[in-house]
Image: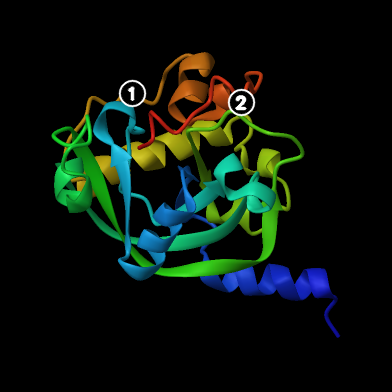
Amino acid sequence: MFSVAERIAFIITLMFRPTDLLLVCIMPTPRDLEIARLLGWYRIPLRTSPKVVAVDYLAFYQNSAFCEHGGQIEFIAQVKGHELTTRGELLKDEADHPRAKEEYYKIQLGRLEKLSQRITADKWKRLTFLYTTGEYLSNTKLLNDLVVQNEEREILWKNLRERAEHEQHYKTDLPAVDIPPDVLMMLLGIKEMQEPYDAKEQSNDNLD
């Protein structure tokens, strides 16, 4: 017989391949979660977007707007594609929004899946995005454990870079693989996670 933990790990493993590329991103509000659930898309402002959006899955980190459900990853979704549009086109009921004409990535999603075991932060993290893999996500209970370690970071960036070159519709300047460690940490979203969290400084403004 399998233990509960082993059954959970098995279920999660069925959803991912170890080499799948995952982007952990902020779910700003419960309304945005409902948009992902019902309409099948998620938006990322182009001006603050990570370099590569052509990934296999998005994992959604729920912030303090989710109250007791904040500070954790409960849901993931397979990425079906992406396009560049404007905020006004995405949210037609907010045509007067100050950023209505700004460009946003519209990430098309598959069904929103609830993880059998949520991934929690041991304390609040400053997080905008984080790249990781299916292997890491299927073997963790804590947000910190999603951070790809050591020489695997170069492999992850190489795979992300290749994915963007072959599948990303909108090209961006992508640094080479042989880059300083601190730059690599910034590109993968790791550096920001290590900075002190200040709830007053971290708002949804850059994500909305």
Position of 196 relative to 167 (above/below): above
Q: Secondary structure at mark 2?
A: loop
Disc 2 residue type (three-letter): Ala
Q: Residue at x 41, y 67 (%)?
A: 37
Q: Secondary structure at mark 1?
A: loop
Q: CA distance from mark 1 to mark 2?
A: 34 Å
Q: Residue 166 in the image: state x and y as whole percent.
A: 21, 47
Q: Residue at x 40, y 36 (%)?
A: 158
In the rendered image, which residue does mark 2 sit on? 199
Considering the image in quadrants, where does the N terminus appear? bottom right
Position of 64 relative to 19 (above/below): above
Mark 1–mark 2 CB contact (< 8 Å):
no
Disc 1 residue type (three-letter): Ala
Nearer to us of marks 1 and 2 is: 2
- Determine the image quadrant of residue 45: top left
Q: Residue 78 in the image: state x and y as whole percent.
A: 40, 63
Q: Is residue 184 left or right of residue 104?
A: right
- Determine the image quadrant of residue 145: top right
Density class for disc 2 (Cα within 10 Å; few <14, some 14-19, many ≥20) is: few
Question: Is residue 92 among what the camera can see?
Answer: yes
Of residues 161 and 206, the one drawn nearer to the viewer in this rendering: 206
Q: Residue 39 in the image: state x and y as whole percent.
A: 30, 66
- Determine the image quadrant of residue 8: bottom right
Q: Residue 146 in the image: state x and y as whole percent.
A: 63, 43
Q: Residue at x 25, y 58 (%)?
A: 81
Dot placed on the residue nearer the N-terminal end, 1 or 2: 1
Density class for disc 1 (Cα within 10 Å; few <14, some 14-19, many ≥20) is: few
* Marking on residue 144: none
In the rendered image, which residue does mark 1 sit on? 176
